[in-house]
Image: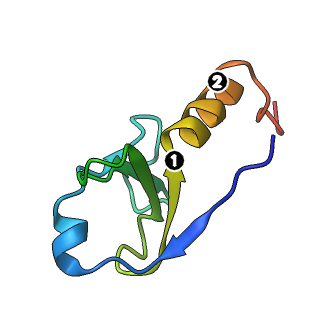
Amino acid sequence: MIMSETHQTLSPEERARIAWHISTYSPHNGGSCVEAGPLNDGTERVAVRHSKRPDAEVIIYTRAEWEAFLKGVRNGEFDFFG
């Protein structure tokens, strides 16, 4: 599966409108995490960022790209270490 990606630097106002989510399986003791959240701009896109660098660039995925990724996760396509 190939995903197109767009690296973007969002303004503080744009970042504030994103409801960022971290997996409940993520370590809460300062571990490196990936956060994702929907852009609330009517475009049905998802922003992804590194939790330790919240002001750095984000990667923006379309709804179709995000749904394809989630389907792959659910089907075990990313179980590299399992």
Measured as percent of width and height from the top left, residue 42 is found at: 26, 47
Q: Answer yes or no: do the residues labelled 1 and 2 have beta carbons within 8 Å?
A: no
Which one is nearer the viewer's eye here, 76 or 48?
A: 48
Task: Report the amino acid beneath label 2.
Answer: Lys
> Crowdedness of circle 2 by 10 Å Cα count: few (<14), some, many (20+)?
few
Task: Report the amino acid beneath label 1.
Answer: Thr
Q: Quadrant of residue 52?
A: bottom left
Which one is nearer the viewer's eye here, 43 or 78?
A: 43
Measured as percent of width and height from the top left, residue 55 is found at: 35, 80
Residue at horizontal 79%, vertical 48%? 2
Which one is nearer the viewer's eye here, 40 or 73?
A: 40
Residue at horizontal 48%, vertical 59%? 31
Residue at horizontal 46%, vertical 44%? 26
Q: Indicate which disc residue 71 carries.
A: 2
Q: Is residue 65 above or below residue 82?
A: below
| 53 left or right, relative to 6 | left
Residue at horizontal 81%, vertical 40%? 1
| 68 left or right, relative to 62 | right
How many numbered marks does the figure carry? 2
Residue 32 in view of the camera = no
Give the CA distance from mark 1 to mark 2.
14 Å
> Crowdedness of circle 1 by 10 Å Cα count: few (<14), some, many (20+)?
some
Q: Secondary structure at mark 1?
A: strand
| 69 left or right, relative to 28 | right
- Looking at marks 1 and 2 on the same chain, the residue that comes earlier in the sequence is marked by 1
The residue that disc 1 covers is 62
On-image quarter of the C terminus: top right
Measured as percent of width and height from the top left, residue 24 is found at: 39, 35
Q: Please name the colour scheme applied to the rendered image.
A: rainbow
